[in-house]
Amino acid sequence: MKAQPALPEGLRSTSRATPVPAGGRRPWVEHWLETCRDLSELKASHPMMDAVIDEIDGRTIRIGEHWLADFASCNYLGFDLDREIIEAVPAYLDAWGTHPSWSRLLGSPVLYEQIEERLTSLLGTEDSLVLPTITHIHMSVIPLLAASGTIFLDARAHKTIYDGCQVARSRGAAVKRFRFEDPDHLDELLRAERDPTRLICMDGVNSMTGNAPDVRAFAAVAREHGALLYIDDAHGFGVVGERDSDETCMYGMRGNSVVRHFDESYDHIVLVGGFSKSYSSLLAFIACPTDVKDLLKVAAPPYLYSGPSPVASLATVLAGFDVNERRGDELRRVLCARTARVLECLDGLGVYTPNTSGFPIVEVPLRDYRRIGEVGHVLFEHGVYVTLAAYPLVPKHEVGFRVQLTAANTDAEIDALIVALEHLAERGELRLRDDDPAWMGEAA
Ligand SMILES: Cc1ncc(COP(=O)(O)O)c(C=O)c1O
């Protein structure tokens, strides 16, 4: 790893504070900044928020004068840095140019068909449709599937699922929330529901806890009540997959996502996922029956109206499938071992993390949410870059930082992270396993 940063001196210059115009801010700008004050202050002052990355070298990044080990990347398999994938791209650019530019309905390069065919086979679904991002899919597909029926929304679902449900509500759907990780509560709500159109929306591998829901239990509830279970596995796709007696680690094989990981069928399930994390490309998918795919081709606005993914992204997905097939399970083994080192360190320190799965998202809550800025500086000074989870991004008692591991992180980078975690634990900054989380929120 490159030299560690010595001082936080001049750090502010690497962040971009919103300039206050002469005559003060407009009242509506002031209003919105006030509603997310903790976050906007952090953004304005902290080197780990809204940072400009000047350069990368493997999984180290340079911000101004400072080289840091990057634990904020979602490139779990390291495909962004994989020479085989990088070298596959120019031939696609030569053949297709940089950008197809048609919306998919107007003109769909055969690359899409190749991607959908390989994806469908990898996942073991009836069919699949790719669109540029998961956000596009949530905003366009959730309202279609919900129609004027009722959506049962996981209370801790990702913000983009919430936004899709808001659009559905504005088109006549009702939205009811069930408690996070609580299939019994969902069952109770569905039992009391008279509306025959029922859509359940939730995350797969959770982007904060790093854990997967009990897909079997949720699928059973959905089937019992004739509901459709819509799962967003942005973080699980590529990382977790089908279990096998020959598996290289407990993530399972092939990275074919959370439904296969739980050995479930796709009966009453549609799976949404993205290539922008494990596959390091700008593309997303919905795995669904062919009649639903055909409907989406005429009714989902992004298929009709949105610009497409760049050719380089389509190319990296196709090359990514090849690498996944040949080397993916070995990369997942490395990823699992790297993650285990971090979890073992926290365990040894008695520090709490919600991660019980061993998957590569490790959230570390603080004892005092007001210390997030200082804790971020300590990490920065130790040459470690993480995602800061400030209020109101998360509730006050969950404020902390999120460490994401990738197969491209080196042992030396993990050594640096462990030194920083030990230092923070010694200073009493990190919530301990025995601390009462409710008290943590109140105390601060
Ligand atoms: C669970 C989840 N869903 C959706 C998204 C958004 O994905 P996209 O960038 O493809 O819109 C993210 C991004 O981090 C995510 O974590």
Image (spheres, rainbow, N blue to C red):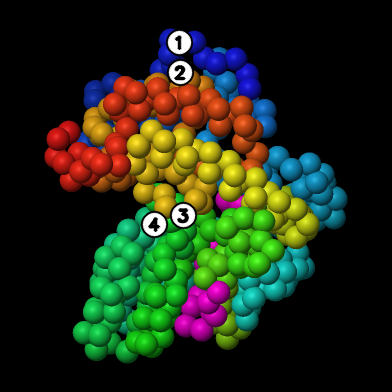
- Which residues lie in the magenta part? 263-278
Is the distance from the Cβ of mark 4 to the nearest ligand 1 atom less than 8 Å?
Answer: yes
Type of amino acid at the residue the image marks with label 1:
Leu
Residue drawn at point x = 24 percent, y = 25 percent? 24
Q: Which comes sooner in the sequence, label 1 or label 4?
A: 1
Decide: is 382 above or below 30.
above
Q: Residue at 47% of width from left, 40% of height from top? A: 344
Task: State the quadrant of the C terminus.
Answer: top left
| Viewer-nearest of discs 4 and 2 | 2
Q: Give the distance between the C-alpha atoms of the residues marked 4 and 3, in whole angstroms.
A: 19 Å
Mark 3 highlights which residue? 357
Label whose residue precedes the other's in the sequence (2 or 3): 3
SS of the residue under disc 3: loop
Task: List the residue tagged with mark 2.
Answer: 381
User: Which callout, 4 or 2, points at the residue further toward the start of the chain?
Assistant: 4
Q: Secondary structure at mark 1?
A: loop
Q: CA distance from mark 1 to mark 4?
A: 36 Å
Of the numbered discs 4 and 3, the one sitting upstream in the chain is 4
Estimate the spatial distance between the alpha carbons at disc 1 and disc 2, rounded to whole Å: 7 Å
Q: Which residue is mark 4?
A: 158
Q: Are marks 1 and 2 in contact (CB under 8 Å)?
A: yes
> Marks 2 and 3, Cα distance to the nearest angstrom?
30 Å
Q: Name the front one of labels 1 and 4.
A: 1
Q: Nearer the viewer, mark 1 or mark 3?
A: 3
Q: Residue at x 25, y 73 (%)?
A: 185
**Which image quadrant: the N terminus?**
top right
